[in-house]
Image: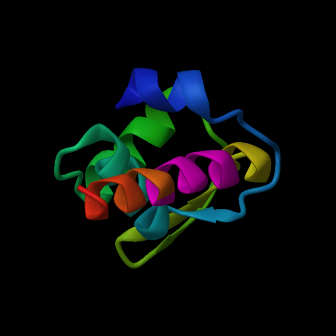
Amino acid sequence: MLGWLRANITPIKTPTTGSYGMKHVVEDLLGRYVSNGELVAAALMAGYPWKGPFGPNATFGMRKKDVDRVQAARQEQARSAAGR
């Protein structure tokens, strides 16, 4: 997952992306279960700016345009699967 984050999500200075929501996006695109802690650890190792923790969650500096793009891919993947 570390490589996937680095390849797909550009870091930004201001943390705005929640780990819990992002973990669902990543697990759908990777096709496997991803724990919130795994996402948090990978994002920290990738060097994303962060704030928190807020319980088990954190907020990371991930470029919104990139997050929106991968969320759109996730939705398209779900639509394609439903059409089969």
Up/down of 37 relative to 12, above or below:
below
Colouring of the image: rainbow
Outermost residue toward the bottom in this view: 55
Q: Position of residue 57 (x, y in %)?
A: 43, 69
Q: Is residue 77 left or right of residue 35?
A: right
Q: From this viewpoint, is residue 23 visible?
A: no
Q: Quadrant of the N terminus?
A: top left
Q: Position of residue 55 (x, y in %)?
A: 39, 79
Q: How many marks?
A: 0
What residue lies at 57% left-to-right and 46% top-to-bottom? 70
Q: Is residue 64 left or right of residue 2?
A: right
Outermost residue toward the right in this view: 13
Instruction: Assess whether residue 73 is covered by the magenta stretch.
Output: yes
What residue lies at 71% left-to-right and 36% top-to-bottom? 11
| Range covered by the magenta-colored residues | 67-75
What residue lies at 68% left-to-right and 55% top-to-bottom? 68
Rendered image quadrant of residue 14: bottom right
Looking at this view, is 80 or 6 the one in front?
80
* SS majority, magenta: helix
Outermost residue toward the left in this view: 33
Q: Quadrant of the C terminus?
A: bottom left
Q: Position of residue 43 (x, y in %)?
A: 48, 40
Up/down of 59 relative to 55, above or below:
above
What residue lies at 49% left-to-right and 39% top-to-bottom? 44
Instruction: Assess whether residue 38 is covered by the magenta stretch.
Output: no
Q: Is residue 12 left or right of residue 75?
A: right
Looking at this view, is 8 or 19 the one in front?
8
Q: Position of residue 6 (x, y in %)?
A: 55, 24
